[in-house]
Image (spheres, helix red, strand yellow):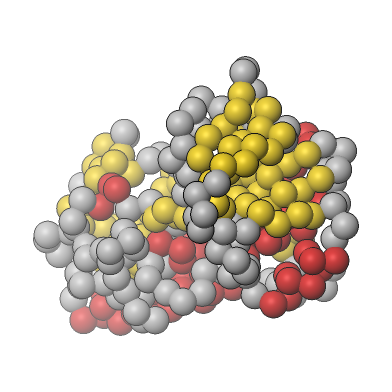
Amino acid sequence: MHIYDMIIIGGGPAGYTAALYAVRAGLDTVLFEKLSAGGQMALTGDIDNYPGFEEGIDGFTLSVKMQQGAERFGAKTEYDEVSNVDFSEPIKRVRTANGIFHGKTVVIASGANPRELGVEDEQKLIGKGVHYCAHCDGRFYKDKTVVVVGGGNSAAADALYLSRLAKKVYVVHRRDTLRATNVYHEPLLKAENVEFIWNSTVEQFISDTSVKGIKTKNVTDKTLKELACDGVFVSIGRKPATEFLKEAVNLDENGYVVADESTRTNVDGVYAIGDVRTKVLRQVVTAVSDGAVAVHYAEEYLSKS
């Protein structure tokens, strides 16, 4: 039975930073990623707020660079999905389709997935007018009409990006002002092809084989309104990928792993990093920081065990 010093679950910026720091520290490390390097970062277009790239860098390229950087020093990547874990013993167990893997420490870096609206036919219309990544699919809507649902930073960034492609962008938000930081407000309000539908939610998709429009409901006066559109981009937050944990560690009321800035969970030798843990700010730079911090505390734990 091979016992790794560290098992990392998730290959986003947090996971690959942890892998880089771990192998450079001489830890026998394996990283599990179910899809491809980068996680949600790989689906992002231009990243302008990650230090060291004065002209910005696209998320896919940065993802590949992070993976290559870790693997250069000996990090091992397994493209496999973790189905469940057992942290009840000092040697932790992680199960995938290819078997059970054992580790002295485990780093949870599974990230968070797009949150759905929960509207009828939403699943059926994914890829047929319903999307969750503007930078991935926005190019299909050049000179067309689209709707962005949400009012946070991601929704505002999506609306700005789409305004440079689409003929018309509607922003549907349940409140009467954006939750996004001020940096987005002025350019969005100045964009001539962006229109806000305040105090409203999406109640229904209008479609045949693809999206033809939406029906919105005003949360104040309950009036319904139909908007013709070619596509809808849902940007209402993320859902942490923690289903596989099954009470192995403490989660908060929203499903995020409870861990402070030390990244330590309630289980000795288990750490949570990146978007999956409780934190104020979920950005690439904070995920990277988490990865380095987790390895520091893992080394400290291993030295005492």
Q: Residue furthest top?
A: 209
> Is residue 22 left or right of 89 when viewed as pictured?
right
Residue at 12% over, 61% down: 89
Q: Residue furthest left?
A: 89
Quadrant of res 173: bottom right
- Between 276 and 263, the residue placed more toward the observer is 276
- Between 205 and 152, the residue placed more toward the observer is 205
The reply to whether residue 112 is visible in this rendering is yes
Q: Position of residue 285 (x, y in %)?
A: 59, 73
Q: Position of residue 273 (x, y in %)?
A: 41, 67
- Between 23 and 90, the residue placed more toward the observer is 90
> Is residue 76 left or right of 70 when viewed as pictured?
left
Quadrant of res 202: top right
Q: Position of residue 99 (x, y in %)?
A: 26, 37
The reply to whether residue 295 is visible in this rendering is no
Residue at 51% over, 25% down: 124
Residue at 86% over, 43% down: 167
Q: Is residue 164 above or below residue 141?
A: below
In this rendering, the count of numbered labels is 0
Q: Is residue 274 above or below residue 4?
A: below
Quadrant of res 186: bottom right
Q: Is residue 184 above or below residue 198?
A: below
- Between 300 and 111, the residue placed more toward the observer is 111
Q: Is residue 144 above or below residue 271?
A: above
Q: Position of residue 201 (x, y in %)?
A: 53, 49
Residue at 85% over, 52% down: 193
Image quadrant occupied by the C terminus: bottom left
